Image (cartoon, rainbow, N blue to C red):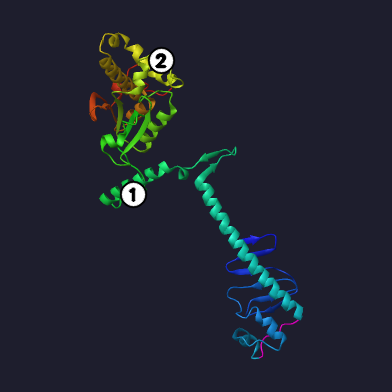
């Protein structure tokens, strides 16, 4: 229903309606004639405009009036010839207004679509450039369409199944490094692995982001394998080996520097810088593995009998290989006694 507030006219379903008192009615035709208003129904009298004028001349010959009032037509009472003329003018005016409003609405919709595509207006009236104005995005959309088409070619029902939910068996905690994408490394499809990534694949007992991912995947998705994956040539580990200042990230790298401090003697004994770098990547992975096992989330899962195994893997960007670091835990015995909390307070 479109309301033209300034005219007092309501428009909808193909009908124009204006309400006034003291009207005469052609009941079959659905035409109500008042001092300054008319109601015309889509299913109303086909002679809506002419019926009134004809009755002033002795009767309407339209079939819709024949059936109700006889061959000589309907007699409209208390209506002057000037009222008939006024009705004609009002109907014409309403049709004109309707056309103008339809045109305005169409223009407004077009403008809104263009504005939405070009920018997003924020609460403080600042704007963000939308993707539609960035020609580089079209290539990404093209690649997405090609990928989706290739998936459907292999499995026409893939996305129909994907939209119904997920049931991954693996939680992957890895590095944000663009060279270490979980699904591609494991050659697994969307829906098969739950992923958390951050700079340096750190598992910190105060990081609510990582802990929330762990709890959700273990408690609700019921994953049964948790993979902590480090990688060689890690930029975060490399930065933590230096004494350089990088900015806010230094507070995050502190966790890797703690590993460096804890194993300072071993690292100092390695003369080759590349080997020392690789060793710190491994030591850091070992520490994150222990951090995962020490969380109350994993301990509670084990205490409740949940089938969960934690693995430590390392990825080599030099050859694309994923290597088992030889560390796995499936029960609380892997947790240091310092961090073990088997009983409730």
**Mark sitting on residue 244:** 2
Q: Please name the residue shown 52% across and 39% down the image.
A: 128
Residue 88 visible (yes or no) = yes
Instruction: Say what secondary structure mark 2 lies in.
Output: loop
Residue 76 highlighted magenta (yes or no): yes
Crowd class of label 1 (few under 14; some 14 to 19; many from 20; radius 10 Å): few
Residue 1 visible (yes or no) = no
> For this rendering, which residue is in front, 276 or 24?
276
Cβ–Cβ below 8 Å for labels 1 and 2? no
Total marks shown come to 2
Residue 246 highlighted magenta (yes or no): no
> For this rendering, which residue is in front, 333 or 57?
57
Residue 231: x percent and y percent? 29, 25
Crowd class of label 2 (few under 14; some 14 to 19; many from 20; radius 10 Å): few
Q: Main secondary structure of the magenta part?
A: loop
Q: Which residues are magenta?
A: 72-77
Q: Taking 241 as reference, is 328 above or below it?
A: below
Q: Taking 115 as reference, is 27 above or below it?
A: below
> For this rendering, which residue is in front, 130 or 175?
130
Identify residue for label 1. 159
């Amino acid at each position: 229903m479109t309301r033209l507030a300034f005219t007092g006219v309501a428009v909808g379903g193909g009908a124009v309606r204006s309400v006034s008192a003291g009207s005469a009615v052609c009941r079959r035709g659905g035409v109500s004639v008042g001092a300054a208003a008319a109601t015309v129904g889509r299913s109303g009298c086909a002679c809506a405009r002419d019926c009134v004028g004809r009755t002033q001349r002795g009767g309407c010959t339209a079939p819709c009036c024949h059936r109700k009032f006889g061959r000589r037509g309907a007699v409209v009472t208390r209506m002057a010839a000037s009222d008939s003329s006024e009705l004609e003018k009002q109907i014409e005016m309403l049709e004109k207004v309707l056309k103008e409003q339809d045109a305005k609405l169409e223009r407004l919709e077009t403008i809104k679509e263009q504005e939405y595509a070009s920018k997003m207006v924020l609460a403080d009236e600042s704007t963000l450039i939308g993707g539609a104005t960035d020609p580089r995005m079209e290539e990404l959309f093209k690649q997405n369409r090609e990928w989706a088409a290739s998936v459907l070619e292999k499995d026409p029902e893939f996305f129909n199944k994907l939209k119904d939910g997920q049931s991954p068996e693996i939680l992957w905690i890895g590095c944000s490094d663009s060279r270490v994408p979980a699904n591609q490394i494991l050659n697994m499809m969307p829906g098969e692995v739950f992923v958390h990534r951050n700079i340096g694949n750190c598992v910190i007992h105060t990081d609510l982001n990582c802990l929330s991912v762990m709890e959700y995947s273990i408690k609700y998705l019921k994953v049964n394998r948790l993979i902590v994956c480090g990688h060689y040539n890690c930029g975060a580990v490399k930065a933590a080996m230096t004494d350089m200042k990088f900015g806010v990230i230094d507070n995050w790298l502190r966790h890797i520097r703690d590993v460096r401090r804890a194993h300072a003697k071993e690292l100092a004994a390695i003369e080759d810088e590349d080997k020392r770098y690789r060793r710190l990547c491994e030591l850091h992975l070992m520490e994150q593995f222990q951090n995962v096992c020490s969380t109350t989330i994993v301990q509670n899962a084990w205490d409740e009998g949940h089938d969960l195994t934690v693995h430590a893997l390392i990825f080599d960007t030099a050859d694309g290989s994923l290597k088992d670091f030889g560390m796995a835990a499936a029960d609380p015995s892997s947790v240091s006694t310092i961090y073990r909390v088997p009983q409730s307070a």
